Image (tube, grey):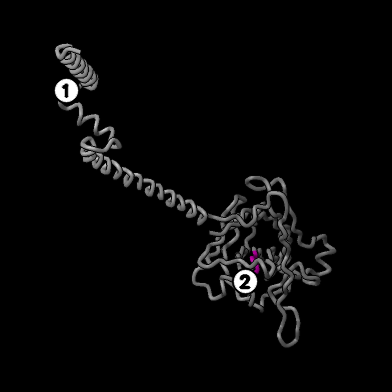
Amino acid sequence: MPDAILRKGKDNAVKDSKQRLNQFAALCGLGAVGILAACGSNATSSGGTGGASAKGGNTGNGGSSTTGGSSATGGSSATGGATGSGGSSAGPVTLFDFANSDQGWTYNTYQATDSTSGATVAPYNLVVAGNLSAADLDAGVRAPTLAFDSTTGDPPGSLKVGVTFTGNNQQVNPNCDWAAGSLQDWTNKTVSVRIKVDPAVTTSSTGWGIQLFAQDTSWSGQYQWADFPTDNDWHTYTLSMAGTALDPTKITQFTVQFSSPNVAASGDDGGVSSFTPVTVTAYIDNVTVQ
């Protein structure tokens, strides 16, 4: 074939190749000179000179520092902050809400006695036989009652205490007694109870009281006394376990005591005839610890 035809073919091939290259450069918005380097940065796998634009790839490493940015996921360890909701577990824990039953509460039947004679001494526990005189019982005084009440409470449901006091130094002690395998740990905790007395005790006598107390397995106790309310509204009563001498990790009993005025022994009538009987109806609800 003549050389002129070969040269013309080669010239046309070169011309065609340059034309395609310029068209591609125009699509990329680049000059014909920069096109090779620009595409090389997108094709680092092609190696060679284009691979030198792998420096641009190094900035890709900088991009990988955004992976470091993904350590912001570590920031999602702020979810660990959600353990703060574990902090919400530090909020009040409801022990008893009496929503559907008395939840195992009963009257404590302990009665103090003289260590020498064994005779009953004040205070007198009115659920113990003999502490309400026959005359009182004959006069229609009822023995103390303790029952679930489905209508009173917020929401409805509470423990209802019914007792008629016939003298000074009398008490009833509704309480919960935990089994040995369910001892409560109340270290530095505060126990709260909602109580309503209805109707309110309207008497000239002073010293009517509500006492909360907790006992450990050795029967050491922590006590908090409060006067009876002067109205028939709900009130919150608290017992702090901070600084107690008992073992707060072994709480076995919690009691809500209702009592008539405590007077000196010389004025004690043994529950026989010091004043007109006073009937108290009280409701216990929402026992919490925090």
Q: Amino acid at mark 1?
A: Ala
Q: Residue at x 24, y 32 (%)?
A: 40
Q: Tell me the crowding category of disc 1: few under 14, some 14 to 19, or many 20 or more residues within 10 angstroms, Cα based.
A: some
Label 2 residue SS: strand
Q: Amino acid at mark 2?
A: Gln
> Residue 34: horizontal and vertical position, in percent?
17, 27
Determine if residue 26 is in view: no
Question: How many marks can you see?
Answer: 2
Front-lying residue, 207 or 102: 102
Residue 45 is a magenta residue: no
Decide: is 73 above or below 6: below
Q: Which mark is residue 163?
A: none
Examine the image and state in which quarter residue 202 appears. Answer: bottom right
How far separated are the C-alphas under marks 2 and 1? 92 Å
Q: Residue at x 26, y 38 (%)?
A: 47
Which residue does the numbered mark 2 point to in the structure image?
Answer: 215
Which residue does the numbered mark 1 point to in the structure image?
Answer: 32
Q: Which residues are magenta?
A: 250-255
> Residue 203: horizontal and vertical position, in percent?
64, 59
The residue most toward the front is 1
Q: Choose mark 2 or mark 1, whichever is in front.
A: 1
Q: Residue at x 80, y 60 (%)?
A: 142
- Comes first in the chain, label 2 or label 1: 1
